[in-house]
Amino acid sequence: MTVRAQDLLLGLVPLALVIALWQALVSFGYAPATLLPPPGLVFRRLAQQLTTLTFEQDVAATLFRLFAGFLIAVVLGVTIGIAAAASPLINSAVRPVVRVLAPLPKVALYPALLLLLGFGHGSKITLVTADALFPILLSTYYGASTVEQKLVWSALAAGTPPREVLFKVILPAAAPSILTGCRIGLVISCIVVFLAEMITSTDGLGHVLVTAARTFQAVDMFVPLITISLLGLILNGALGALRSYLLRGFPEV
Amino acid sequence: MRSRFIPGTRAAPWLACLGLLVLWQIAALALKNDSFPTAWAAIRAIPLILADKEALINILASQRRMTIGFAVAIVVSVPLGLMMGRSRAVASFFNPLLMVIYPVPKAALMPIIMLWLGVGDLSKTLVIFLGVSLPVIYHSFEGAKSVEEKMLWSGAAMGLSAAQRMVRIVLPAALPEILTGCRTGLVLALITMVTSEMIARQSGAGNILFNALDMGEYDLVFAMIIIIGAMGICLDAMFETLRARLVRWSEPQFDMPLSFS
């Protein structure tokens, strides 16, 4: 426990250093406050913004798109991944398509999505799904195809119907890998939803940043960036807690 | 549940490409939407872009920025990741900082970096560098962490210094994992390149794409999407060939790429 606390303290050092350097740059006049507002000002502004309704609505819009896109990606990714691992036929159909689509820069598809689905939630949620899908799909596939064959055989020998083997053996055995994929997918969702909102949007954190950049309000540019970073940390922490709850029977993974 | 070898693996990606294009063509014909051209119309518009000398120079300039950003990121991130993997203190020093930076979209830093460094090559390359470094650091870290202790002990017993052990044992042992990170980083470099140019709207492939969108030249929009997509797929395939040569000795892991944004 003390070792963990030591590690945590050590980790806070670079964060403190960055903030100190930031403050020093402003205080010693290397950077004008209009370009680089002092950290105190930015955090005060953040605290102040968090109580205003418009900012809360922006955060809510971002979160809604993030979760919608991410959840669709989880459902699709896990289903396709398991199906591809279970059936050679589906595998031979999915594999080449994934090979082509996974390295495609999905952000470049965004103009096409805009033209097809309009400027509302639809196009942004689709983009988030498209980007978060592949890490989840690939790690599900990887997890499910490395399940030990003996486990499946034992379950079958013990009289489990083949249909139930999926839920009782394969899904739990692939869970650590699936959750790793979800974690990558979640971080990606944070990034993509922000980018999509920066490109075209009338609300959301990305829109706040773009508006601030257009009017040269440096303070307001830092606020959404810090907010998305905090959101990412919180969501990551929540997923980590969910993971250790779901995997409580597993050896350290 | 082991996946079996499927014959005709080489042709499969091409077939998949063709299938997707056919699907696109059918969807466009069925929807009959003005802003959704058919696949064939988009393919015919590709020569229009590539024949334009200015556009070609722009695309090449984008690629140069991407290459520089990618190369610098690898040079910095791999040693950092390896050191984090071998030393607990270094890891706990950098981990929280990286955790904080991770969910921030690197291209979103563009407006701020532009204020300091201008809209030129430097700020765009810096953003690409930032985007590529994180996955490379992460994968090098994971790779170095899982190096077998026994090999390091044997190395130490044979009189290798700490630095020598790093270069001669940890680096090769972590190489497959590092290359997985580099592959992710490569796709990321492309994505960051497009988004940074889209925000800085001065030159480059992303600029051509979003200018065409603003002008309502939908054929060009989709043609540019095909060009950028093809760049992604070609770079990935090239890297995969290189990787297969470098780590021929290791067991194949993912044969499919993990893409980030």
Image: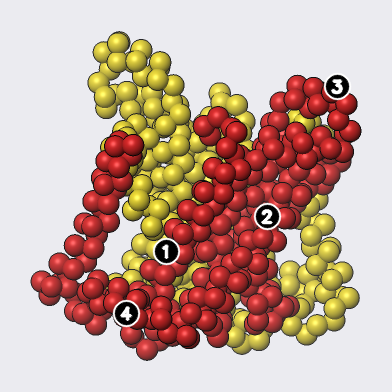
Chain colours: A red, B yellow
* Label of residue B137 in the image: none
Q: Is residue B234 visible?
A: no
Q: Are marks 1 and 4 in contact (CB under 8 Å)?
A: no
Q: Pick out the residue farthest to the top.
A: B158
Label 1 to label 4: alpha-carbon separation? 16 Å
Amino acid type, residue under disc 4 in the picture: Arg
Query: Does residue A20 appear to the left or right of B149 in the view shown?
Result: left
Q: Are marks 1 and 2 on the same chain?
A: yes
- Specify the quadrant of the image occupied by residue A138: top right
Mark sitting earlier along the chain (1/3)? 3
Q: Secondary structure at mark 4?
A: helix
Q: Secondary structure at mark 1?
A: helix
* Label of residue A157 in the image: 3
Residue to which mark 1 is pinned: A229
Label 4 to label 2: alpha-carbon separation? 35 Å
Mark sitting earlier along the chain (4/2)? 4
Q: Is residue B24 above or below residue B150?
A: below
Q: Nearer the viewer, mark 1 or mark 4?
A: 4
Mark sitting earlier along the chain (4/3)? 4
Foreground residue, A248 or B110? A248
Residue to which mark 2 is pinned: A74
